[in-house]
Amino acid sequence: MCQYSAIDGFANNWHLVHIGQFAAGKAALVIQEATAITPEGRITYGDLGLWKDEQMSALQDIVNFVHDQGGLIGIQLAHAGRKASTDKPWISRAQIAPEKANGWQTVAPSPIPYYPEERPPLMLSVSQIQELVQAFRSAAVRAVEIGYDVIELHAAHGYLIHQFLSPLTNQRTDEYGGSFENRTRFLLEIVSAIKPVVENRSLWIRISATDWADGGWGILESIKLVDIVKTMGVEVVDVSSGGAVRHQEIIVKENYQVPFAHRIKEETGLLTGTVGMIKRAVQAEAIIEQKKADIVLIGRGFLQNPHLVLQFADDLRVDIPWLPQYVRGKETL
């Protein structure tokens, strides 16, 4: 979950405490918020970044702490595309114009703004696309050097990679637009570029299984894409949905995204994670027991309770060790 608390992409004590508390609470894997591979790839001016070596040191402290607690840590490498250059959400969700403080010119596969009143993004040239592929690779190299256990490409929620995938946001007529093969080219080139440098780390991809909109990206294309990336060394697909367009027709309810993960898991055989409106221990346990997904990922629940794992364990009557500093709290349960 993005914290919008970085300065020039640099992590600080907020991120150390925020991420560290989940590891202290026995989360098996903590995935760091979407981390931009270029300054223009940030959603807001408060996003984390990994586009230069100087940003590595503060992230190293976070990774070291999580490992010291016996946990694993992942990083989402991302570029927001046309959904970049917005204000922090507690201030305004409006996009900031390039000529104003904390704003910049956005880029995308096609010059289509997310909101009609926004300034259109600039259409990326083929050479600029290739530069971004290399930017993803460079960020992955830094992430491996820092020691992240999971490298996840954020190809969901209407951000840049997803913008290439969806025909609703990609209206190009060159080798990066039109057919399924062309629309997936950007993502597959990124995977090809970073796979050799992730070494023994686990490579994941987060996708939106459907745009929830007519004429958009859908589950059949998701299955086809996952079949391809499976052969390229991707180990896990983290299945979400939506975010590409404002007119999506989505009904949010308990387990509403689980069927997408289940179908992808069944038809591709790739390890699959599921997300969204998973709030209770018995609910998460049932997803795993019924083999609807291999991994359950929770975001907002951990914002409400950083030690959610300990609460879930208590709900399921499973005894897991608490930190000795916190064990007195267990006595009150």
Image (cartoon, helix red, strand yellow):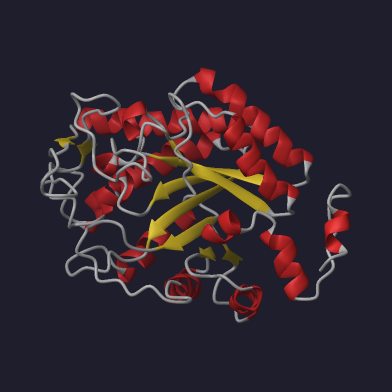
- Work out whether residue 82 can be spotted: yes
50 shown above or below 73? above
In this orientation, which residue lies closer to the viewer: 73 or 144? 73
Viewer can see residue 200: no
Residue name at image x 75 percent, y 68 percent: 313
In this rendered view, identify the residue nearer to me: 15 or 65: 15
Q: 329 above or below 164?
A: below
Residue 178 position, x and y percent, is 15, 53
Give the quadrant of the C terminus: bottom right
Residue visible at 17% across and 49% down in the picture: 177
- Residue 21 location, x and y as percent? 68, 46
Q: Is residue 279 left or right of residue 114?
A: right
Counting labels gives 0
Q: Residue at x 70, y 56 (%)?
A: 307
Q: Quadrant of residue 220?
A: bottom left
Residue farthest to the top, as pictured: 54
Going by the image, does 165 lie left or right of 236? Answer: left
Q: Is residue 112 left or right of residue 131?
A: left
Left or right: residue 290 compared with residue 192: right
The location of residue 42, given as percent across then percent down, is: 36, 35
Residue 163 position, x and y percent, is: 26, 49
Compared to 322, does 69 lie above or below?
above
Front-lying residue, 228 or 324: 324
- Identify the residue at horizontal 22%, vertical 58% (top origin): 245
